[in-house]
Amino acid sequence: MIRLSQVSKTYLSGKNSLWALRAIDLEVKSGDFLVIRGPSGSGKSTLLNMLGLLDEPSSGTVTLKGTRVTYEDFDRLAELRSRCISFIFQAFHLNPVLSLEENVMVPLMIRRDISSNEKQRRVEEWIEKTGLTSHRHHRPDELSGGQRQRVAIARAMVGEPQLIIADEPTANLDSHTSRTILALMQELNREKQTAFAFATHDPVLDEFAKRSLLIQDGAFKQGL
Ligand code: ADP
């Protein structure tokens, strides 16, 4: 579904180039459940940014569903991203003034290809699937960490993306809540073949991974 070929990313640090990624080859297919591990500063976030089309490689190519991604047309890229890819962040990034239900609706607001009835149906479906129906009118500050992460999952799923990218999704959760959240993601992965790509330090993720990769100094060290 998405393929990185010989993707490198360098940042300028003073007069020197810093290599955040070195000639990475990676393919994420439909139904994948991929965990990327590695020490802090090894390139995990940079790699997720490449998979999420959030940043342009310094060299190499990114191919989405057989088409090479170009980065000049920002609006086209944002449109492409909004149809195919969702993000879950460790800090949840929910809108504090909106209710749970309104937060889940946010990604659908710009979608002109989906009717309002269908939008409402999907929001209800995902609120129910994530077990949040009785909290639908609550604001994020009235929810626990685990409930907020479930809102973030519902919001990520509502657009029915092919790929969900999650940077340290369990970092703010206790291990019991982490396992519950990961089991939910695993169920969505099985049911809808949604691909997941995680970056994490959390060993709990390895219990759920279909594939685990270790990155060090911007390059993969081993496939497990
Ligand atoms: P990780 O997510 O594994 O902690 P990152 O992908 O954030 O690693 O960073 C990889 C390397 O790239 C690090 O050395 C980091 O300092 C550097 N880096 C990341 N983003 C930037 C940036 N915007 N400008 C300069 N250097 C960066």
Image (tube, helix red, strand yellow):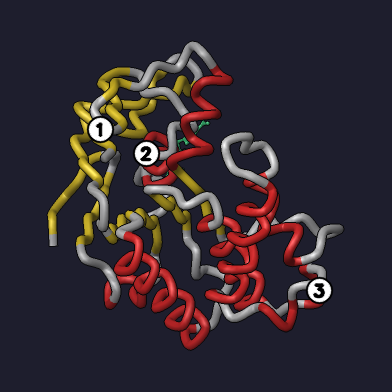
First in sequence: mark 3 vs mark 1? 1
- In terms of depth relative to the viewer, which is nearer, 122 or 15? 122
Please name the residue shown 43% across and 41% down the image. Answer: 84
Q: Where 122 falls versus 173 (above or below)?
A: above
The residue under label 1 is which amino acid type? Leu
Estimate how packed mark 3 is, as few (under 14), some (14 to 19) or many (20 or more) residues with alpha carbons within 10 Å.
some
Q: Position of residue 70 (x, y in %)?
A: 39, 16
The residue most toward the left is: 223
Please name the residue shown 47% across and 55% down the image. Answer: 167
The residue under label 2 is which amino acid type? Leu
Question: How far apart, in angstroms, are the residues tagged by discs 2 and 1?
Answer: 8 Å
Quadrant field for ligand 1: top left
Where does label 2 land, which residue? 51
Q: Quadrant of the C terminus?
A: bottom left
Q: Where 216 falls versus 67 (above or below)?
A: below
Question: How far apart, in angstroms, are the residues tagged by discs 2 and 3?
Answer: 33 Å
| Secondary structure beneath label 3 | loop
Which quarter of the figure has residue 152?
A: bottom right
First in sequence: mark 2 vs mark 3? 2
Please name the residue shown 48% across and 88% down the image. Answer: 176
Estimate how packed mark 1 is, as few (under 14), some (14 to 19) or many (20 or more) residues with alpha carbons within 10 Å.
many
The residue under label 3 is which amino acid type? His
Q: Position of residue 11 (x, y in %)?
A: 44, 24
First in sequence: mark 2 vs mark 1? 1
Mark sitting on residue 138: 3
Contact? badges 2 and 1 (CB < 8 Å): yes
The residue most toward the right is: 97
Where does label 1 land, which residue? 4
